[in-house]
Image: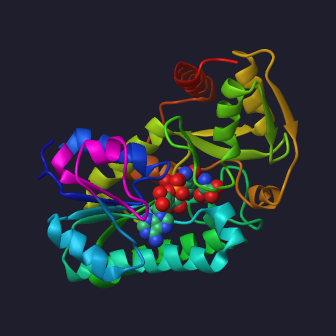
Amino acid sequence: MSRTVPRVLVTGAMGQIGSELTLALRERYGHDNVVATDLRTPSGPLAETGPSDVLDVTDMNSIAEIIRKYRIDTVYHLAAILSATGEKNPAMCWRVNMEGSLNVLNLAVELKLGTVIIPSSIAVFGPETPRVATPQETVLKPRTMYGVTKVCGELLGEYYVRRFGADVRGLRYPGIISSETPPGGGTTDFAVEIFYKAVQEGSYTCFVKEDTSLPMMYMPDCIKATIDLAEADFRKLKHHSDFNVGALSFTAGELATEIRKHMPDFRVVYEPDFRQAIADSWPSSIDDSAAREEWGWKPAWDLSSMTADMLSRLSARFGRV
Ligand code: NAD
Ligand code: SER
């Protein structure tokens, strides 16, 4: 690694992505250089393998205190309220997602920080957006409060780059599939729950229809994409806060069929709830040529390798039914 070792703050580190990304960042930059924070008290490997603290991202003074205390120069701002929880409490979703991002961006300028990563999401898209191979530049008219905050977050990031010369970067993650920490209240959660239920109970009641097709990504690719973007040469980026990143695209039924290749008796019933409308408003696949051209994005995992790995990890932890 030729660049100076960063001093990293991770917000929302107890979440699905933060819990694994933080450990990967510690492996890469040194355990003492990566501070895990969350509204919930960090516990387990996050608390055991490096510095950690409680931090509410809606409180700008507390963020500034942590940045000074740990001499932070790089922020991975992961604290957020996701789509399904956001529809149950839109006001909280707006407050956490917008105040949190604005606080981090203002401190990036005031305290002259280096790189700030603020993830975006496929939730920025809406029903008017082309659903197949969704382009980088396209209609952004989301139907969820979560999506509204993600569009605003992208625009704010771009504004802080141009207005203040801040180094802000972000990716539109698809649904993230992982085996370590359960997802935190999103619409794509079914693609993780299905694995836990397959291994623990042998059956699953899926909250979207069988033919619901969405873009997804396995956690190792998510971590790689995030760190690759963070380490890319900023001067070579034409986009900043809104990179489309694709990896996998499949229907709920195709995922169940793939699981059945390993567990022939696995049963799924489909009982769509309010999350179906959210899923229907999102793309089914993503054109990520800008990320591939500007910072070399290339996913490594496909549906078959991801499914085999998820089942093997969860079976090792829970045993098979
Ligand atoms: P998550 O819900 O699993 O975790 C979010 C964390 O933020 C939680 O640990 C929660 O305790 C914490 N948090 C909530 N309010 C807070 C506050 N006021 N102050 C500090 N912490 C607070 O989310 P995730 O899946 O890990 O998502 C991380 C980022 O990636 C978010 O910006 C999310 O929008 C984005 N993203 C995630 C996915 C996905 O499928 N997981 C997809 C697209 C985008
Ligand atoms: N996985 C996220 C959600 O469903 C997408 O941003 O909310």
**Is 261 colored magenta in this rendering?**
no
Residue 173 in sight from this viewpoint? no
Q: Residue at x 65, y 46 (%)?
A: 215
Residue 310 in sight from this viewpoint? yes
Q: Residue at x 43, y 53 (%)?
A: 14
Q: Quick one: 42 or 129, which is closer to the camera? A: 42
Q: Position of residue 163 (x, y in %)?
A: 33, 84
> Splitting the image into four quadrants, where does ligand 2 fall?
bottom right
Q: With respect to residue 77, does 250 lie above or below?
A: above
Q: Position of residue 101 (x, y in %)?
A: 42, 74
Q: Quick one: 278 or 128, which is closer to the camera? A: 278
Q: Quick one: 105 or 248, which is closer to the camera? A: 105
Q: Quick one: 252 or 247, which is closer to the camera? A: 252
Q: Position of residue 106 (x, y in %)?
A: 32, 82
- Give the side of residue 250 with respect to residue 95, left or right: right
Image: magenta residue range: 31-52
